[in-house]
Amino acid sequence: MPYRIGCCIPGASFMPEGEAGIKKGPLEVLSRGCETIINAGFDYAEAGVGVVMAMTEAEFSEAVRMNLPLEAANSFIPPEYRIVSDGASDEGSPLYEYVDRALCRMAKLGVGVVVFGSGGARRIPDGMEKARGLEYIEDFLSMCGKLGEAHGVTVAIEPLRASECNAINYTTEGCNLAKRAGSGRVSYLADAFHMCEGGEAADALLSAEALPVHIHVSEAPDRTYPGSHGGEYLSEFADALGKTEYRGRVSVECGFSDFEREVILAYDFMKKHFK
């Protein structure tokens, strides 16, 4: 296959609680998730930034030692950090310090791309002009470019469907913002689910001014595993992607009702269509 095919770890919900209802810690979630994904046939795993940031220093050191097959991460900025706010991205601000710490940890784990979806954090407040809100987001991306250069990690802007965020909803918007950032460490992501939900053609990337640095796929309209509903849009998306020069990572990002069973079905679909 010309791509590296990966899968996102779905979170602690896929793991049974321990004795007396004790929840599993973030390190175990990562290690067990990676194991299940690699055993299903995938090339790598993708984690949530929040899971990595929840680890203690001792747990994080152990994760680094384990050399987990993590190549990408998502859910970059928690909603409590408001990007569209005066001074949010200034050096020394809480947001700046969080991004610095997060990218530092990603780099040490071998993560090359961090996906910037984070609809709650980047939402433009009611009453603010969209153009003004995007200026704040551009400031944030400029900060990400600088810190991304320092840590060797690329931040990928993820367009989200309108029901999840009122800023950056289409592939062209993500592509244009990445170009304006003017940094080799800021690019964009193409998410087939959000593209389908937003009415974008499956072959939209064929006319994009620049290719994305990362890709997410799942079934619309319920974000289940690829192939769960036949995968018609995803099949068309894969065919169109194959006509471009993209040769990067493609991650399954979806919800699972039975992770250990459905992750194998997801890989079978990916192996068949993304080749």
Image (tube, helix red, strand yellow):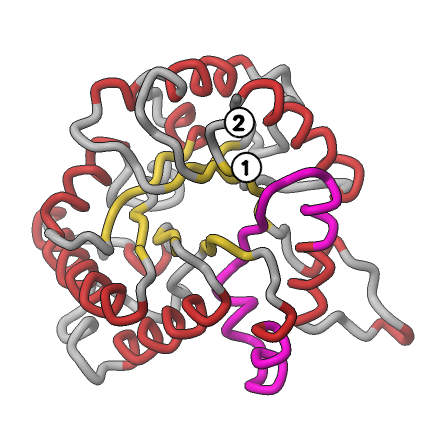
Q: Nearer the viewer, residue 209 or 81?
A: 209
Residue drawn at x 17%, y 80% as measured from the top left: 91
Which quadrant would residue 96 be assigned to in this image? bottom left
Q: Is residue 109 visible?
A: yes
Left or right: residue 67 versus residue 237 is right
Q: Is residue 140 magenta?
A: no
Q: Which residues are magenta?
A: 35-63
Which residue is at the front of the view, 250 or 190?
A: 250
Label 2: how many Cα within 10 Å (few below 14, some 14–19, many 20+): few
Asked if residue 199 is positioned above or below residue 43 in the image, the reply reads: above
Q: Residue 197 location in percent, x, y?
A: 41, 26
Left or right of 214 in this view: 18 = right
- Residue 196 numbered mark, or none: none
- SS state under label 2: loop
Report the residue marked by disc 2: 1
Q: In the picture shown, does residue 93 fall above or below 117?
A: below
Q: Is residue 128 visible?
A: no
Query: Is the residue 232 above or below the residue 8 in the image?
Result: above
Front one among 95 and 36: 36
Q: Which residue appears at 52% of the width and 21% of the height?
A: 275
Task: Point out the residue furthest to the right here.
Answer: 19
Check disc 1: other Cα within 10 Å, few if <14, some if 14-19, many if 20+: many
Q: Position of residue 95 (x, y in %)?
A: 29, 74
Mark 1 vs 2: CB contact within 8 A = yes
Q: Amino acid at mark 1?
A: Ile
Task: Return the x and y of residue 28 as percentages of the image width and height.
Answer: 72, 68
Which mark identifies residue 5?
Answer: 1
Type of the residue with mark 2: Met
Tell me if 96 is positioned left or right of 120 in this view: left
Please check the rendered image and state whether residue 49 is part of the magenta-colored stretch, yes or no.
yes
Tell me the distance, in whole angstroms, between the alpha carbons under discs 1 and 2.
Answer: 8 Å
- In this rendering, the label closer to the viewer, 1 or 2: 2
